[in-house]
Image (tube, grey):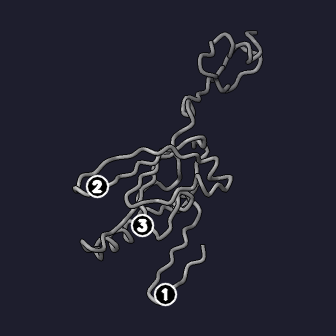
């Protein structure tokens, strides 16, 4: 968004693919050192299928879309139908409860302000992986077949079906 800049502000622009953890860690340590009991340091966390998982400072009026942007966006393996937000709530007696909130990433990406929840201190967003995303594997067929080479195999596929795809035995 359009934020007002102050004389002591520092702006870091990350290159695509740049490791952000060292720069962010320095900022987090500085903010934590400045915090007091009356003005505690507040952060949010994102993990899962994003390029730059980790903790980030909670900004004023920060939403899920802002945290996704800070984490570098979604990876190709991200399950956009649902993510999970863990929210910690401290009640009046000083004990903490945990609330799990289902997040519709597809709606957020489509611009839904209702789905793009405002973040609270210590919220933890987990971007899930598409089911069976990592189950992809390849089979290399060499020797006496019509079309030797590497073939992506489907879960549960048999050797005979891959051999058939390779043109059969010669």
Q: Mark 3 or 1 closer to N-term?
A: 1
**Residue with the mark numbered 3:** 57
Secondary structure state at the residue bearing disc 2: loop
**Residue with the mark numbered 1:** 6
Residue 5 visible in the displayed image: yes
Residue drawn 34% across and 73% down? 31
Give the CA separation, mark 3 to mark 1: 18 Å
| Relative image position of residue 80 (x, y in whole percent) | 60, 43
In the foreground, 58 or 90: 90
**Residue with the mark numbered 2:** 91
In the foreground, 102 or 157: 102
Q: Where on the picture, by quarter, is residue 56?
A: bottom left
Give the CA separation, mark 2 to mark 1: 35 Å
User: Where does the N terminus fall, quadrant-wise?
Assistant: bottom right
Residue 77 visible in the displayed image: no
- 99, above or below 61, in the image: above
How many neighbours does mark 3 have within 10 angstroms: few (below 14), some (14-19), or many (20 or more)? many
């Amino acid at each position: 968004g359009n934020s007002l800049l102050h004389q002591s502000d520092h702006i870091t622009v990350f290159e695509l693919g740049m490791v952000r953890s060292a720069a962010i860690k320095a900022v987090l340590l500085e903010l934590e050192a400045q915090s007091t009991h009356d003005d505690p340091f507040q952060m949010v966390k994102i993990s899962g299928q994003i390029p730059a998982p980790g903790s980030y400072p909670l900004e004023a009026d920060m939403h899920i879309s802002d945290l996704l942007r800070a984490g570098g966006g979604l990876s190709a393996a991200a399950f956009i139908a649902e993510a999970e937000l863990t929210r910690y709530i401290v009640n009046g007696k000083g004990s903490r409860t945990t609330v799990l909130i289902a997040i519709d990433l597809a709606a957020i990406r489509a611009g839904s302000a209702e789905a793009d929840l405002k973040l609270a201190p210590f919220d933890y967003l987990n971007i899930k992986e598409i089911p069976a995303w990592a189950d992809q594997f390849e089979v290399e067929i060499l020797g006496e077949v019509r079309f030797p080479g590497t073939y992506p195999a489907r879960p549960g596929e048999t050797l005979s079906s891959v051999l058939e795809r390779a043109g059969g035995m010669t």
